[in-house]
Image: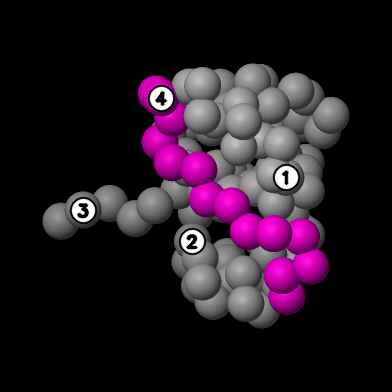
């Protein structure tokens, strides 16, 4: 049986997304919980990799960083202003 996805939410994601995902038993770690607020994108990606997590971001600039690192476990992107309920449902 495949294991469930584990997510790392960067600082651009509304904290309510993490709350909603947890209500659906999704394993979530936020930037705030990891004490990585204001860490650069490379550090964020390194943490996600070390934790065995795909990263979810709403920072379009992060996509540039991710494109240069092919060892990540997945990058999920949604534009800013996407409703929280929609993000939870889609994730």
State the residue at coordinates (51%, 21%): 68
How many other residues sit within 10 Å of disc 1, few (<14), some (14-19) or many (≥20)? some
The answer to which image quadrant residue 74 occupies is: top left
Q: Which of marks 3 and 1 is nearer the N terminus?
A: 3
Secondary structure category for the residue under label 3: loop
Provide residue 58's location: percent of width, then percent of height.
70, 51
Q: Give the range drawn in magenta.
A: 70-83
Provide residue 3's location: percent of width, then percent of height.
28, 51
Residue at numbered disc 2:
26
Residue nearest the viewer, comparing 23 with 52: 52
**In this orientation, does residue 47 appear?**
no
Residue at numbered disc 1:
59
Residue at numbered disc 3:
2
Q: Which of marks 3 and 2 is nearer the N terminus?
A: 3
**In this orientation, does residue 66 appear?**
yes
Q: How far apart are marks 4 and 2 (CA)?
A: 24 Å
Q: Which is more foreground, mark 1 or mark 2?
A: 1
Q: How far apart are marks 1 and 2 (CA)?
A: 21 Å
Q: Which of marks 4 and 1 is nearer the N terminus?
A: 1
Q: Residue 73 carries which label?
A: none
Q: How far apart are marks 4 and 1 (CA)?
A: 18 Å
Q: Which of marks 3 and 4 is nearer the N terminus?
A: 3
Q: Earlier in the sequence, mark 4 or mark 2?
A: 2
Q: Is the magenta stretch mostly helix, strand or loop?
A: loop
Secondary structure category for the residue under label 2: loop
Q: Which is more foreground, mark 3 or mark 1?
A: 1
The answer to which image quadrant residue 63 occupies is: top right
Provide residue 40's location: percent of width, then percent of height.
75, 23
Q: How far apart are marks 3 and 1 (CA)?
A: 29 Å
Q: Which of marks 1 and 2 is nearer the N terminus?
A: 2
């Amino acid at each position: 049986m495949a294991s469930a996805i584990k997510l790392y939410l960067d600082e651009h994601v509304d904290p309510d997304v993490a709350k909603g995902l947890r209500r659906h038993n999704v394993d979530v770690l936020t930037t705030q919980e990891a004490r990585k607020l204001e860490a650069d994108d490379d550090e964020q990606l390194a943490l996600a990799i070390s934790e065995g997590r795909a990263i979810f971001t709403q920072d379009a600039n992060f996509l540039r960083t991710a494109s240069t690192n092919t060892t990540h476990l997945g990058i999920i992107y949604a534009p800013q202003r996407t409703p929280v309920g929609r993000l939870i449902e889609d994730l």
